[in-house]
């Protein structure tokens, strides 16, 4: 596997609009788009800093994974996404090593990327997303 860059850092927020006051207004990182990922019951805002992005994640329903995260832990860092050049290959390698996965197969994430999540029990409690962008 060849990780190439921290693709993005996902931050769970109750409201993207409120969060942007700090991220855009305060830090001056421009939000370049907002996308709803219906399957994940989340709305995502993209704030790139060179090759990396801050992604603000706002739940769109109470029973989605981000809503549950906020309910348990409050707002904050939700996951770390690492870009790889070949996601299928990366998943095969992790499987061979017996690394516990949430996604055994790539699926479509926000921004048109193919993604897969590694179970946080593999990484000291950090939810890690692997992401491949073409
Ligand atoms: Zn992500």
Image (tube, rainbow, N blue to C red):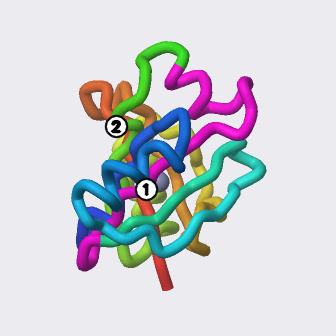
- Point 52% across, 54% down: residue: 116
- Could you tell me residue 121's position as x and y percent? 36, 25
Q: Gap in Å between the C-alphas at discs 2 and 1?
A: 10 Å
Left or right side of 51 for 121:
right
User: Where is 97 relative to 65, above or below?
Assistant: below
User: Where is 16 relative to 108, above or below?
Assistant: above
Left or right side of 122 for 106:
right
Dot 2: few (<14), some (14–19), or many (≥20) neighbours within 10 Å? some
- Label number found at residue 28: none
Left or right side of 1 for 70:
right
**Residue position for label 1:** 55
Instruction: Please identify the quarter of the rendering in which residue 3 is found.
Output: bottom left
User: Is 67 part of what is drawn in magenta?
Assistant: yes
Q: Which residues are magenta?
A: 49-70
In this view, the residue farthest toward the bottom is 134
- Point 40% across, 43% down: residue: 11
Mark 1 CB near ligand 1 (8 Å cut): yes
Is residue 1 visible to the viewer in this orientation of the structure?
no
**Residue position for label 2:** 77
- Could you tell me residue 1's position as x and y percent? 30, 66
Is residue 102 visible to the viewer in this orientation of the structure?
yes
């Amino acid at each position: 596997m060849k990780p190439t860059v921290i693709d993005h850092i996902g931050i769970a927020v109750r409201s993207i609009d409120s969060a942007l006051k700090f991220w855009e207004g305060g830090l001056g990182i421009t939000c370049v788009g907002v996308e709803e990922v219906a399957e994940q019951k989340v709305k995502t805002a993209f704030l790139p800093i060179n090759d990396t992005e801050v992604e603000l994640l706002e739940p769109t329903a109470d029973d989605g994974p981000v809503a549950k995260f906020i309910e348990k832990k409050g707002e904050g860092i939700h996951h770390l996404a690492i870009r790889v050049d070949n996601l299928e290959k990366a998943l095969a390698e992790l499987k061979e090593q017996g690394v516990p996965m949430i996604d055994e197969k790539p699926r479509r994430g926000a921004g048109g990327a193919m993604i897969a999540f590694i179970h946080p029990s593999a990484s000291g409690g950090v939810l890690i997303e692997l992401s491949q962008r073409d």
